[in-house]
Image: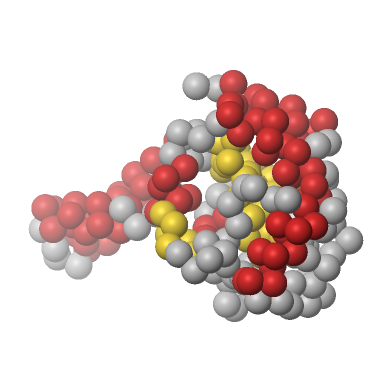
Amino acid sequence: MRGRIRFLSRLLMSLTLGVSYLLGLDAAHAHEEALRMAAKTPSLYDFTMTDIDGKPVSLGRYKGTVVLVVNTASFCGNTPQYADLQALYEHYHEKGLEILAFPANNFGQQEPGTNEDIKGFCLTKYSVSFPLFSKISVKGKDTHPLYRYLTEQSPFLGEVEWNFQKYLVDRSGNVVNRFHHRTKPLSPEVVKEVERVLAAK
């Protein structure tokens, strides 16, 4: 991913330089403008999110860990995946795995409650101990910038299909895999990939 970003940044810089020369701008100004534009390319760590209790959390705090980003819902056929996510978290957290849950009401109105409702449900029903965040939109015109990044600027382009779609992020912040919403967190496909990324230094 970082290689791709560097390539795109160089391409953007070259294009900006070329356009600037055509417009009669000097090389130094053109170079500065290209750097400014390239610096806008976000990463997971650039986002500050609001947790389930309304407190801001910089995702930069997760640098150096492996992160599984999941959009969740309380009244979905996939909701029992919370139990698998918790089991995955308990088994691999000490090895460097973080799971970040982002409740969303985009699919079938299956997350209609307040943040307080969601927190109570997750704690009571599934004893969730991984980070829960405030409800956001992951699809449509009001898509949160984090999910615009995941669906439009990561290597795994395309809209979120349903609740419990999962993105795996390595220790350097690269989005390295995406798992279908029906793929359970304890499936061999997910576990094998999590172990592979955790083992990479």
Q: Quadrant of residue 99?
A: top right
159 relative to 80 in the view: left or right: left
Q: Residue at x 57, y 77 (%)?
A: 142
Residue 145 visible here: no
Colour basis: secondary structure
Q: Quadrant of residue 168?
A: top right
Image coords of residue 129 (percent x, y): 64, 48
Image coords of residue 131 (percent x, y): 58, 52
Q: Is residue 79 above or below residue 154?
A: below
Image coords of residue 201 (percent x, y): 50, 22
35 relative to 141 in the view: left or right: left
Say how many tags the image has. 0
**Outermost residue, right side:** 77
Q: Is residue 54 above or below residue 175?
A: below
Residue 171 visible here: yes
Q: Residue at x 44, y 57 (%)?
A: 57
Q: Residue at x 52, y 62 (%)?
A: 51
122 relative to 77 in the view: left or right: left
Image coords of residue 48 (percent x, y): 43, 59
- The foreground one among 143 and 30 is 143
**Outermost residue, front side:** 124
Q: Is residue 23 above or below residue 113?
A: above
Q: Residue at x 73, y 50 (%)?
A: 127
